[in-house]
Amino acid sequence: MNKQKLVLLYGCETWKATASLIKKLQTFVNRCLRTILGVRWIDRVRNEDLLERANQTPMEEVIKRRRWRWIDYTLRKTSVSITRHALKWNPQGKRGQKRPRETWRRCVEKEMAKMGHS
């Protein structure tokens, strides 16, 4: 399952992790785990118990951990690095019609506020 998970989460450090995206990923992983462990729908095993039985962490935590590891790695680079500039880049102008106001940067800032960092 680890190799498949790596492929599934390729580049997730830069995704805007919305609730619907995380729910879809978690649903897919749960379905795979049920198949691997041989859990049928009749058995009625809760998702939390399934993750515990498979010794897996929820997708939201995996994505957060990977994002923060990538940010840490990027901040240790030199100040002329293009990835470091990308963290601070703030596009100007109005967003297009029906475009979400939530950006990757705002998601990260919200996470930082929840964790007590400013």
Image: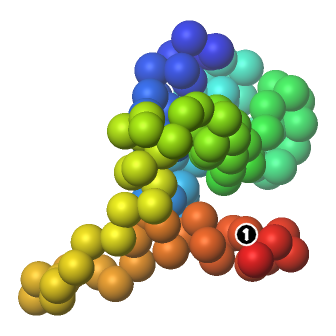
In the rendered image, the vertical position of residue 67 relative to residue 55, given as above or below: below
In the rendered image, the vertical position of residue 46 relative to residue 78, given as above or below: below
Position in image of residue 32 (x %, y %): 57, 27
Can see residue 21? Answer: no
Can see residue 109? Answer: yes
Residue at the top extreme, as displayed: 3
Using a 10 Å C-alpha cutoff, classify the residue at mark 1 as few (fewer than 14 neighbours), some (14 to 19) or many (20 or more). few
Q: Tell me if 70 is positioned left or right of 20 in this view.
A: right
Provide the residue designation for mark 1.
Answer: 112
Q: Residue at x 58, y 32 (%)?
A: 77
Q: Tell me if 90 is positioned left or right of 10 in this view.
A: left
Observer-nearest of 65 and 23: 65
Observer-nearest of 43 and 14: 14
Q: Residue at x 35, y 70 (%)?
A: 90
Rendered-image quadrant of the N terminus: top right
Q: Residue at x 73, y 69 (%)?
A: 112
Position in image of residue 111 (x %, y %): 69, 69
> Residue 43 appears in which quarter of the rendering?
top right
Q: How many marks?
A: 1
Position in image of residue 63 (x %, y %): 62, 45
Q: Amino acid at mark 1?
A: Met
Observer-nearest of 81 and 101: 81
Position in image of residue 35 (x %, y %): 60, 23
> Residue 29 appears in which quarter of the rendering?
top right
Residue at the left extreme, as displayed: 97
Element carrying mark 1: helix
Rendered-image quadrant of the C terminus: bottom right
Q: Residue at x 40, y 78 (%)?
A: 102
In the rendered image, the vertical position of residue 16 relative to residue 4, given as above or below: below
